[in-house]
Amino acid sequence: MQKFSFRVIIGLIFSAIGMVTLLLLKQPLTAAIWLSFGNGLILSDLKFTGTDAKGITYTKPIPPARFFTALFLIVMAVVMLALQIYLDFQESAAAAAPAGIN
């Protein structure tokens, strides 16, 4: 059984980008966006295996709490991205505004 699907690998890459952004660039909001989306992808699709009483290996279903946590993380990533865009527009509007006359 393949444990790492395409979504899990993409989630790991996004989480790694988030950690690099946090540690090297010191941008917490951007890092939180990458980490939230990456961890949401990992939680939503990572499957575990178990063994029943007869010794047969099976794939365990994803618990609802983990699925809803993953959904919450992905939604929060989108909300934080919207906040980042808003803050960037505010910053560029302040830089473009002419200086006041004293």
Image (cartoon, helix red, strand yellow):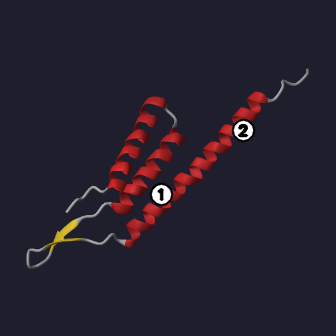
Instruction: Choose the circle earlier in sequence order: 1 or 2.
Output: 1
Residue at 8% of width from left, 74% of height from top? 55
Residue at 70% of width from left, 39% of height from top? 89
Left or right of residue 80, residue 51 in this image:
left
Q: CA distance from mark 1 to mark 2?
A: 25 Å
Q: Please tell me how crowded label 2 is: few (under 14), some (14-19), or many (20+) other residues with Cα within 10 Å.
A: few
Secondary element at tag 2: helix
Above or below for 20 versus 39: above
Residue 65: x percent and y percent? 40, 69
Residue at 18% of width from left, 69% of height from top? 50
Above or below for 99 versus 38: above
Amino acid type of the residue tagged 2 in the rendering = Gln
Residue 62: x percent and y percent? 33, 69
Q: Quadrant of residue 67?
A: bottom left
Q: Which residue is denoted by mark 1 in the rendering?
A: 73
Residue 57: x percent and y percent? 14, 71
Indicate which disc residue 13 carries. Answer: none
Q: Quadrant of residue 92?
A: top right
Left or right of residue 63, residue 54 in this image:
left
Q: Quadrant of the N terminus?
A: bottom left
Nearest the camera: 60 or 22?
60
Residue at 41% of width from left, 35% of height from top? 20
Q: Quadrant of the C terminus?
A: top right
Indicate which disc residue 90 carries. Answer: 2
Q: Quadrant of residue 44?
A: bottom left
Secondary element at tag 1: helix
Left or right of residue 102, residue 5 in this image:
left
